[in-house]
Image (tube, helix red, strand yellow):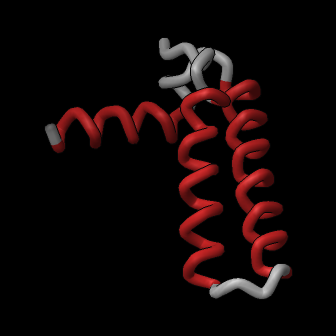
Amino acid sequence: MLELTWYSAKLFFQGKLIRNPGYFYRQLSFGVIIGLLLLVGLGETGINLAIAIGISSLITGMAMPFLLKDVKMK
């Protein structure tokens, strides 16, 4: 299992794992921006920072599979 993870990481950093890296990075950055905006917005409301981090992480984690559903591997 560790060997498969290492091989996949090596291919990813060589740029040989994802068929369309531009689409992948665009969707990934869109998800990160959503998470950051949500975290900042929740932080401005004055709630506890741990709760704001938890909520934004949960929502961002739930959104990522939908954002990355069309990513194709080589």
Q: Residue 35 appears at what percent x and percent y?
A: 71, 57
Residue drawn at the location 73% of the way across and 69% of the way down: 39
Tell me which corner region of the image, top left, top right, bottom left or bottom right, holds residue 22.
Answer: top right
Q: Which quadrant holds residue 15?
A: top right
Quadrant the N terminus occupies: top left
| Vertical relation: 12 (above or below) 36 | above
Q: Is residue 7 left or right of residue 40?
A: left
- Left or right of 2? Residue 27 is right
5 vs 15, left or right, is: left
- Give coordinates of residue 67: x percent, y percent: 66, 30
Q: Where residue 43 sits in the image (x, y, percent)?
A: 77, 80
Front residue of this view, candidates 27 and 17: 27
Foreground pick, 27 / 74: 27
The x and y percentages for residue 56 are 64, 61
Rendered image quadrant of residue 7: top left
Eyeballing the image, is 46 above or below 65?
A: below
The structure residue drawn at horizontal position 65% and vertical position 74%, both measured from the top left corner, is: 52
Q: Residue at x 60, y 72 (%)?
A: 53
